[in-house]
Amino acid sequence: MTNFREVYATLRRKNFKNYLLLIGCCFFSVLLITAYVCMMRSPTVLSVLPEGGDSRKQVMMIFVLAVIGCAVFTTYASGLFFRSKSRETGIFFALGASKRQVCRQIYYDLALISIVSCAAGAVLGVPFAWIVWRLFRLLVVDSEEMVLSFDPQARLFAVIFSGFVILMLFVMGTRFVRRTNIIDIVNESRKSEPIHNVPHWYGKVGIVLMAAGGFLGYSVPAFCVRMLHWYAPDGLTSIAYAPVFIGLYMVLLHTVVNGWGHGKNRYRNIISTSMMKFQGRQTVRNMLVITLLIAGSYFGAFYTPMLGTGAMMAFDQRTVDYAYRFRNDQDIPKEDEVRSMAEKAQVVITDLTAQPMARLAIDGTESIETETSFGTTWESEYRETMQSDLFLPESAWNALTGDTLNLSAGEIVAIFDQYGNANGRMGNDVTLVTNYVTGERLPVTSRDEVLKNDVLFGYRVMDDSDYQKITTGLPAEWLETMVFFNVENCADTYPFAKQLFYEIVDHSGPEVEVFDAWDPVRRDIDIQEKGYYFYDPQQFEGLDGTSIERIDYDEPDSTNFRMYWQYMPKFRVLDRADFVKTTAVFLMLFIFISIVCMTAVIVIAYTRCMTIALINRQVYDDLRHLGASRAYLRHSVRGQVKRVFFVPIAVGTAGILGLYLMILYFNGSPHGYTPNEIAGIAVCLVLIAVCSLMLYCIYRKTLKSVWRTLRI
């Protein structure tokens, strides 16, 4: 070694583990963010996420959590790196090395570390996302719609995040070498960030604040809309969640400084508790990130069991095997043709009934919105003609369901889902029904007691005589037919169901190639007031910039078609068999999000626990020399590792589960849980148990690694 560069290179080789830790953290963070953003911005995914819908908002929310978590994680890793460099840097200064020499070597290291790790993460993030997606296609379901495509612009965010990592490293490196006090630099590796005097009530108050913040954050937007007639900006209402983070920080502070055990054995943990106090701020920051990421992971993971369990139960609980409707101006297969198809497919139809329906205009109150510089305000305005609904005569309802409903003249009744919930889809306050073609009006009274039927959910029933009177003069495009039939051995009739579905699609004209939300009455109102109708087949992009994917007869097996075509049949065997295929993109997206966040949790927790070994190695050596037994040393290490792993995971799991249960409860109309939701919650609890077992196994592996590093 004849020059400064060779000496520095020798030290670099000796301390390669510190370099490897920083490289791994930067690479991992950029890899996850790149994979996430490529998946999130993929045209394959965006095609099934409604613009402005809840699913897209949830994906973005978890993405923000992932970005914050990875940013904090890389900042923490860089801080550890500079702490490990402090002693040798201080010695170089003491031996007469100039700042220019040290800066040159540190900047060289940082440039090499940051550029190589970030470039590798950004490049490998795309194949990583593709491999995970491909595995899902191979192991679960595959379809033409599952072919994953990437938006080249998605890499832009990966470049931005990589730029943040590189800039952060150089800023911290510049601050590191600009210090003038050599003693401070040498002692940097021993520097602690202790937390003192945390009251014991912090833990309980923190839990209360978390619960209150979750309730406020969820209820404040609804309060603003319903009571203040104001759609507040999302950023403003999000402030209501602030108590959650304050309470979470208090809980973690209490855990690190005081712990939760106040019994006779509290002094047994005094060494581990004191060690955590001296590294308190770093530990709390890491635990906070782990808590947020585990919450994001479970939030994404809950989507699949809740959607899948509810859907499967709904399919099984339908009162009829096959149901479809069509407009009377369409040449859809009639009873004779359906029976002929069934006979050729060796399917036995046990009963079949076809009943009339009519599309009629109804009155209601509409929200008139006014854009302001600070959100949107709204006022209610009553309209005698607001939209249209499908009406059945009471005889049709009785024939389809086997009921014995008897309505009086002028009386109507709404059909809610099987549990009597409206789910925000319809109201029960109609007072005026109008024949939109002839202008004939019929004042009506809505029954307080609603009907319950999943297949006919969203329709209304009226008296037979009123139906005959109000539908007189309606042309065929305003009249519809609902067909119900059952078959023997329904589970074995999938080929027939598929054939009948394709026949219905092939015989449907372009005038019904529309979304389920398409409404001819609403269309006329919007064209008159706005100049366009958002759901028109020719109008795929609204003037407000939002857009939708069109319904296309050439893609009858696509998610968009199966979920949103207005005349999509409800065949039990078809819906059940093709459910995963139909919703595969939704399911895969949220599973991928969950995997990304859970992986980040594992890596951050493992890194923090290994840091305990690096920082406290001298302390444990001293304790061993003072006569501490191996069992006691292991117990001390276990106490620290256990808190780093279990506390944030437990808090994040309990917090997100509580929030999820609250959302499900208040989303019901009336409030409460349906049997489908209860079954979904049970599956979510099983999922939590499985993930907790996996995390426990990782905790055991990590604990043994820390013991091995400390040689105890």
Image (cartoon, rainbow, N blue to C red):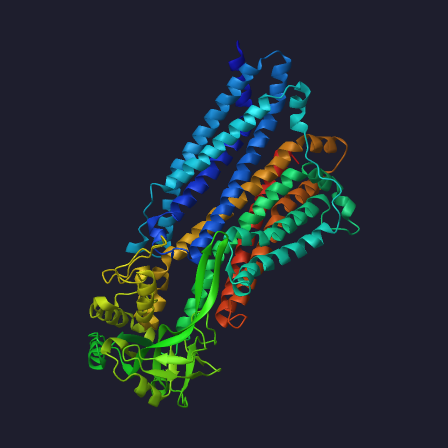
- The answer to whether residue 547 is left or right of residue 612 is left
Image quarter for residue 576?
bottom left
Nearer to the camera, 390 or 305: 390
- The answer to whether residue 127 is left or right of residue 164 is left
Q: Position of residue 418 (x, y in %)?
A: 45, 76
Residue drawn at (63%, 52%) of the image: 243
Q: Position of residue 335 (x, y in %)?
A: 23, 81
Classify 67 as above or below 665: above
Classify 72 as above or below 573: above
Residue drawn at (45%, 67%) of the image: 310
Q: Position of residue 613 (x, y in %)?
A: 63, 35
Please state the total of marks drawn on the protein image.
Answer: 0
Q: Position of residue 78 (x, y in %)?
A: 55, 31
Classify 711 as above or below 359: above
Residue lying furthest top in this view?
Answer: 2
Quarter of the image with the C terminus is: top right
User: Does the image show residue 15?
Assistant: no
Residue lying furthest right in this view?
Answer: 264
User: Does the image show residue 473?
Assistant: yes
Nearer to the camera, 458 or 701: 458
Classify 202 as above or below 78: below
Image quarter for residue 428?
bottom left
- The answer to whether residue 216 is left or right of residue 411 is right
Residue drawn at (54%, 52%) of the image: 236
Image quarter for residue 408?
bottom left
Residue drawn at (66%, 19%) of the image: 182
Nearer to the camera, 268 or 575: 575
